[in-house]
Image (tube, grey):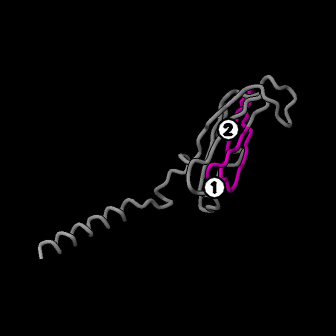
Amino acid sequence: MKKILYVTITAILLISVYSFSQKTDEDINWNDCLEKYKSEWGKPCKGCTYNKDIYKVYFRNICDEKIDVLVSVQEQDGTWKCNYFTELVPNDTIEAHACKGSGKFLYWVKKAGDTEITFPTCSEVNETYKE
């Protein structure tokens, strides 16, 4: 009888620990899903005419879920160039740039398709983060 009680209590404890350790979407900090893995200066870029000041930054989705991303890269004049990416699958990579970059960037991340969270508009980014 003691063995049955011991096994039952152990099972209940293991089930409790397992159920509390499950993360829900609300428990995840989606910004942690985006990893900057590289940045570089001076590489050619479409839409940029003077290569020397081009600043590129590269990111990777390191989570197991698809994500939507807003990356803003600052130009030397203090304005932000905004890049929106949707449905970034696990391990997929993206790049964002500024033609005459300052070397600064910002990003926002949410679970792909989440309609409750909205990213700021590029105008809002420029207004909020102007120097």
Residue 1, above or below 89: below
Residue 47, above or below 12: above
Judged by depth in the image, the label closer to the viewer, 2 or 1, is: 2
User: Where residue 118 is drawn, which disc sits there?
Assistant: 1
Q: Residue furthest left?
A: 2
Image location (x, y in percent) of residue 19: 37, 65
In-front residue for pair 19/26: 19
Magenta-drawn stretch, dominant element (helix, strand or loop): strand
Q: Is residue 114 magenta?
A: no
Horizontal side, residue 123 vs residue 17: left or right: right
Between marks 2 and 1, how big is the CA–CA gap? 23 Å
Callout 2 environment at 10 Å: few (<14), some (14 to 19), or many (20+)?
A: some
**Residue designated by label 2:** 58
Q: Residue furthest top?
A: 52
Chain part drawn in magenta: 67-96
The quarter of the picture where residue 82 lies is: top right
The residue under the point 82% across, 30% down is 44
Q: Earlier in the sequence, mark 2 or mark 1?
A: 2
Image location (x, y in percent) of residue 87: 68, 56
The residue under the point 82% across, 26% down is 51
Q: Amino acid at mark 1?
A: Thr
Q: Is residue 90 magenta?
A: yes
In-front residue for pair 109/40: 40
Image location (x, y in percent) of residue 23: 44, 59
Horizontal side, residue 85 vs residue 91: left or right: right
In-front residue for pair 72/95: 95
